Amino acid sequence: MSPIRVLPNALVNKIAAGEVVERPASVVKELVENAIDARATRIAVTIEEGGRQLIRVVDDGEGIAGDELELAVAPHATSKISQDEDLFGIATMGFRGEALASIGSVSRMQIRSRRHDADEGYEILVAGERIERSRAAGCPPGTTVEVRDLFFNVPARRKFLRGVSTEAGHVNEQFARLALPHPRIAFELTHNRRTTHQLPTQSSIKDRVARFYGPELADELIAIDWNERGLRIEGYVAPPARSRATGQWQYVFVNDRYVRDRFVQHALKEAYRGLMEPNRHPVVFLFLSIDPALLDVNVHPTKIEVRWQDSNLIHSQVLAALREKFLRTDLTPAMRGPAPGRSYPGERTADADQLRREAAEFFRSTTPTVESGGSRGTSPAIPPAREARGTPAGSEELWRSLPTPATPGAVEGGDFQPVTEARAAAGSRALQVHNTYLVVETPEGMVVIDQHALHERILYHQLSRRIAGQALEAQRLLLPETFSVTPDQIALLETHAELLQRLGLELTPFGRDSVAVQAVPTVLRDADAADFARDVLDKLSVRGSEPHTEVLIQDLLSMMACKAAVKAGDPLTPEEIEALIGQKDAVEKSTNCPHGRPTALRFTLAELEKQFKRT
Ligand code: ADP
Ligand code: MG
């Protein structure tokens, strides 16, 4: 082994650069952050060949004094903090004094800068280990940093750079993360001499969102403004129907710094739970402001992670801010057509298409053909007759009872007199089509309801309430039904005895490899008892170790609700339609079934008029 020695500065910088400078986008981030810290009002970013050849950032900020230029590119040299305590109150984007030194060590970097009160500017050149002395140069007030041939002296890194369009894409994304939280600063991005973004000064966050992600999304955003317990949460969240397949569209900023934070992410997931399918991700632009002393940003060299002093506070407040807003917002997705003249009739926006696909998929999954209920394998074409199934909901009592807060006029066991706004205005004009959808007139247009999805949501809501207080009511079977199971599943009867009892499901071992269903929850008395019991045991086999019993119960209840709810293809009486619609506004999250699929689609008069070219 060689003796221990202190590494030369140039090598230290290169090592640091490995952490801070991953690709052209990281250089853009560091340089623009410096411009923001210098209180620039205009920042122009230019890249060539995805930034592999050139990255230039021009700002009109405070500038660097000529005699400080050499210091600015030295490692651990910063004007932003000076003592230990400062680390616990970071109010600037930078503070590590690493970026310029790192970038200079792995590229050919030129800085030209002039302070506003100085008569002339200065420039300095850094190329790997070589630093030229700064010298006077003519330039306007502000700072220009030019970075050429990134990684020219680190072949291993250079090899890892991707193609021009990929690197340009990363720069673009980074640019958005910097420009979104600073709407008062004018930004410009130019790639290979083409200006891709020109964002005016004194703009708004919403305008920035519109410019990056399109006006349609911006129009639908739901504003959040929350200020409690020292945490301010502002910004916008998109309605659930706008969700995406990845979490990439979750823009969360803490004190104007883009971060990835698992506490915030978890709170978002919670807030949207039940409003969209579990594998989807909401689109949000959230800006958290908090006393910097309650936060440690010195966790990661790129500062993309933070450490909270009180992560529970963050989680609970983000969740509360969204929940509270969602309760007061109509989240029913609106059907949108193309703007007339712009596209041909019949064309739909991607999202409307997606909604229709989801609805179609949903329809398929609930028709008797593929229904996992008792009709599996039997003749699917004819929906089971009402009389044969007993009551419409599978339970007279659940269907009729439970007057809800929004239906004070409801008479026990008698007529529903729903008094929701929509119903009041619409009289009793609701129409069932294809024995599957309910079309309801509303003051703004009409709503098309998926009868199964809505009924499922209502039953789920009612079952959840009941089970919170006591066990669900059970009904004994005259003839126990048996079905075969695996030995492991027999053991589940004992380990989950309490849970099964709460669900109103009584199962007893029957020989070595069968189970007998003695009683089922009343709500399911008309469903296939063995089939439900089998599904419950299957769920318990897979999810039985779920540490949160409540989560497991919710899961089982949504299964129960699905089996008990009216199906697509079931004819409904006018009274049943009334009852179903009357309860819509009384349950939480009524816009989506417990699995997250939409229960209703909204068509506005304005949209219909546009489509029929009446306007
Ligand atoms: P840090 O931002 O962590 O302080 P940097 O290496 O990025 O470290 O920058 C070093 C110093 O150079 C900064 O503290 C600042 O004083 C100065 N500086 C860098 N870029 C600019 C700029 N665009 N305008 C004014 N001053 C700058
Ligand atoms: Mg910096």
Image: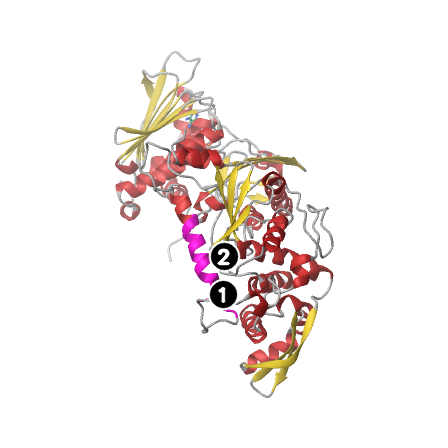
Residue 302: x %, y % from top left: 45, 41
Residue 139: x %, y % from top left: 33, 17
Magenta part of the protein: which range? 355-373
> Which quadrant would the N terminus be assigned to in this image?
bottom left
Q: Is residue 541 left or right of 207 when viewed as pictured? A: right
The amino acid sitting under disc 2 is Asn
Q: Residue 397: which disc?
A: none
Residue 128: x %, y % from top left: 31, 37
Q: Secondary structure at mark 1?
A: loop
Most frequent secondary structure within the magenta stretch: helix
Q: Residues within 10 Å of mark 2 (few under 14, many from 20)?
A: some
The amino acid sitting under disc 1 is Pro
Tell me the quarter of the picture where residue 328 sits. Answer: top right
The residue to which callout 1 is attached is: 383
**In the image shown, does 21 or 168 lie closer to the viewer?**
168
**In the image shown, does 479 or 109 lie closer to the viewer?**
479
How far apart are the alpha carbons under marks 2 and 1?
9 Å
Q: Is residue 110 left or right of 504 when viewed as pictured? A: left
Residue 8 shows in the view: no
Question: Are the residues tagged 2 and 1 within 8 Å (C-beta)?
Answer: yes
Say if 543 sits above or below 211 in the image.
below
Say if 392 sits above or below 498 in the image.
above
Q: Secondary structure at mark 2?
A: loop
Residue 403: x %, y % from top left: 71, 52
Residue 275 shows in the view: yes
Tell me the quarter of the picture where residue 559 sits. Answer: bottom right
What colour scheme governs how the chains and residues are painted in the rendered image of this protein?
Answer: secondary structure
**In the image shown, does 394 or 110 lie closer to the viewer?**
394
Does the segment drawn in magenta span residue 361? yes
